[in-house]
Amino acid sequence: MPSNPPTLPPVADGPLRTPRTRRVRAKREADGRRLGSAGAAVVVCALGLAIAAVLNAPGAHKKAYNLDAGWKRDVALAITGPLATVSHALLLDRPRVGLQAVAGRSGADDIDTQFGSPTLTPPKAAPPKAVVPQKYTPKRPLRLWIAGDSLAIVPGYSILQAAAANRAVKPVAGVDGRVATGLTRPDVFNWYEHVREQLRVQKARAVVLSFGGNDTNPYMTGVPENRSVGEFGSASWILEYRRRIGLIFDLVARAGGHTVWIGLPQVRDDDMTLKFDVLNAAVSAEAKERPRTVTYIDTYLDFAGADGLYAQYLDRPDGRKLKARSDDGVHFEPAGGDIIAAKVMSTLERVWDITSWRAQKAAQAVATP
């Protein structure tokens, strides 16, 4: 007797439902875009960050190098150093180099700490002799170069304005002011090489400089391998800083120039003023060893009030107040720059003959019928 065929379950109306294990791998939104998993997004982000880190490795390595000494700097260097090496080996740093070249910033990632001779004791100048000041005229003007950190900028422009009144003085290159630079960190900006190059290019004989506003930290780069530097103001720190000052002075002297160094002023912060005193003493000591090629201009009391302490406003002869210092308590206002400019121009007139041409010209005018 034939058996009854098996009874099939009723089929429901509508589309067939597949088991959960056979669902379509990727869902689609209403507009048809394919959705990726969260894990894939994380991988893509991580990959992008890795590529960016390698491409930017040279800049990150220099930034790490410029950190203050400590564990943060050590860790940053340990991470960025190998990345920079890999980036250079695989030529992945070439796009960054190309962009810097287009922007006029070639070499911005270079870490340069080499400068001058490692000799710690600069040679002392011979005793000064009576020398007739070299004469300059409008036809053969004295070439003047002004450079330094941010404290040199406002006085620098005041000096340019004052020099414009004397055609026997010819400023070159404007004011070469570099914010957040100094002599303790040639890895940030190598002033030693820059001064050497500018002396060669500009042929300046009068070199007005001002540094120190950013040199109050203990950490230095470019220290000779056989030397160590202690805390700011220590004997070893001062010795190394004097070596660097002396190197700048000697660079100018060997190029046939005379350095006019603008000393650091009092500032609102008493602790910073004490640090500036240390720097001023170091510069003044080196200048005294080179009286024929260096003039140190002391600005300490030029910006002091009646009590001899820091003053933002100075008393004028007519009883009014003159704002000489900026609101940050450190930098100069144009009026303060003019005070320094007057002292610089007086120094130039003492070191060089830049005024007798006027009397000669007047005499010629009288003699001419």
Image: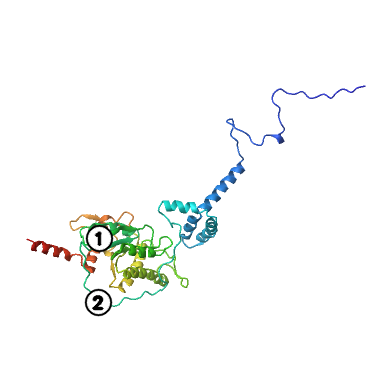
Q: Quadrant of residue 318?
A: bottom left
Q: Residue at x 15, y 63 (%)?
A: 358
Please say if 319 is above or below 34. Answer: below
Q: Position of residue 178 (x, y in %)?
A: 36, 58
Q: Which mark is residue 129?
A: 2
Please say if 298 is above or below 327. Answer: below
Q: Which mark is residue 314?
A: none
Badge 2 element: loop
Q: Residue at x 47, y 57 (%)?
A: 63
Does the image show residue 265?
A: no
Q: Position of residue 11 (x, y in %)?
A: 75, 23
How far apart are the alpha carbons under marks 2 and 1? 27 Å
Q: Position of residue 181 (x, y in %)?
A: 38, 60
Q: Which mark is residue 170?
A: 1
Q: Quadrant of residue 199?
A: bottom left
Badge 1 element: strand
Q: Earlier in the sequence, mark 2 or mark 1?
A: 2
Mark 2 crowd level (few <14, some 14–19, many ≥20, 10 Å Cα): few
Q: Is residue 103 left or right of residue 157?
A: right
Q: Residue furthest right?
A: 1
Q: The disc labelled 1 sits on which kind of residue?
A: Lys
Q: Residue at x 17, y 64 (%)?
A: 357
